Amino acid sequence: MSMSTAPHSTPVGLPARVRIPVVAAPMFLVSGPELVIAASAAGIVGSFPTPNCRTTAELDRWMGTISDGVAAAGPDAAPWAVNLVTHRSNQRLEEDLRLVAEHRPPVVITALGSPEPVMETVKGYGGLVLADVVSVRLARKAAGFGVDGLACISAGAGGHTGHLSPFAFVSAVRQFFDGLLVIGGGIADGWGVAGAVAAGADLVYMGTRFLTATESMASPDYKQMVVEHGPDDLVVSSGITGTSASWLRPSLIANGLDPDALTAPAGRDYNAGADVQGRWKNIWAAGQGLGLIDGVTPVKSIVDDLAAEYAAATRRFAGRTLR
């Protein structure tokens, strides 16, 4: 069915359980239990990547803490999500998936590989599977595995990034996919969220806006660098992880790297644990939304601002709609 000639039918479930249609995206070495719980308590989906935990024992503790914290936040709290790297280099995937089956996060987001390894486990307990994709080709492949949704990472996203415009990505994917569609890439305010939803997305992936949150695990120096710099200070390169990612130029220079002469490693390695954290600990990522950030503030304040902007945007759109 061509979505250009048929109305988009918003999937029931997750979008109806959030205050505003936003996912606090999983950020490497930034998203932890405190940020996830605060996001869910504020009414948006909170998430974190499993490589943020050095060991499976730590991951076990994190998921227990998050599950209890979200439950304690009350009935208005939004669901939480865990992000699993399914690339073959992640030797910890099987153990992490065992803990997913035990803790049953409502949403599991796969990244840097096929969603196939998680489908049976997550669907078995009634969870939702979203596949993180950076191209239309990968979106088609993921859709073929029966995922509930696609997280379409577009140009402007922080960390591992895409190359398509968010609007072009939404339009292309809606030609063949009527499931839950999350879009991310340089969207950092409620106005952008409203635009993405109007274009056909159900939720917006937003990472950089929460990078400097009080509850973020980012170091004070990392947060200050985000506050002091803008989109012109970003470098997109595969020279760190082997996959295109958006890095803060000053952090590359501080680590003795020439931002204009990075060489991609021979192979990609996303194996979780202490080693990967040590390699990338002081090389900092950010997306194009960093230009809107002027300080360190609590998650609740950020979400309140997003909600006010989103409401203003929807009113503006309604006022301009032809009758």
Image (spheres, rainbow, N blue to C red):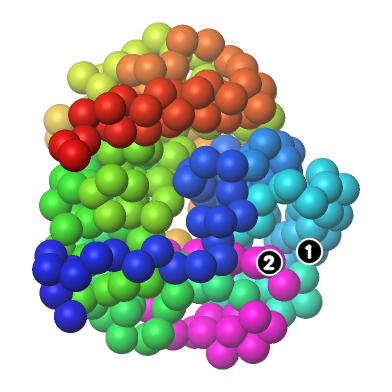
Please, is residue 297 above or below residue 245 in the view?
above
Mark 1 touching mark 2, by CB under 8 A?
A: no
Q: Earlier in the sequence, mark 1 or mark 2?
A: 1
User: Range of the magenta residues?
Assistant: 104-126
Of 319 and 310, nearer the camera is: 319
Query: Is residue 165 highlighted in magenta?
Result: no
The amino acid type, in three-letter code, at marker 2 is Pro
Of 180 and 32, nearer the camera is: 180
Dot label at residue 105: 2
Identified at 15% across, 30% down, the residue is: 260
Asked if one can make out residue 255 in the rendered structure from this viewpoint, the answer is: no
Q: Which residue is mark 1?
A: 60
Q: Report crowding for label 2: few under 14, some 14 to 19, many 20 or more residues within 10 A (C-alpha).
A: many
Dot label at residue 208: none
**Circle 2: element type:** loop
Identified at 27% across, 74% down, the residue is: 177
The amino acid type, in three-letter code, at marker 1 is Asp
Q: Percent x, y for residue 170?
A: 22, 56
Please, is residue 224 above or below residue 316 in the view?
above
On the rendered image, what quadrant is the C terminus found in?
A: top left
Q: Which quadrant would residue 185 be assigned to in this image?
A: top left
Identified at 78% across, 64% down, the residue is: 60
Q: Percent x, y for residue 202?
A: 39, 55
Left or right: 135 as drawn, with respect to 40: left
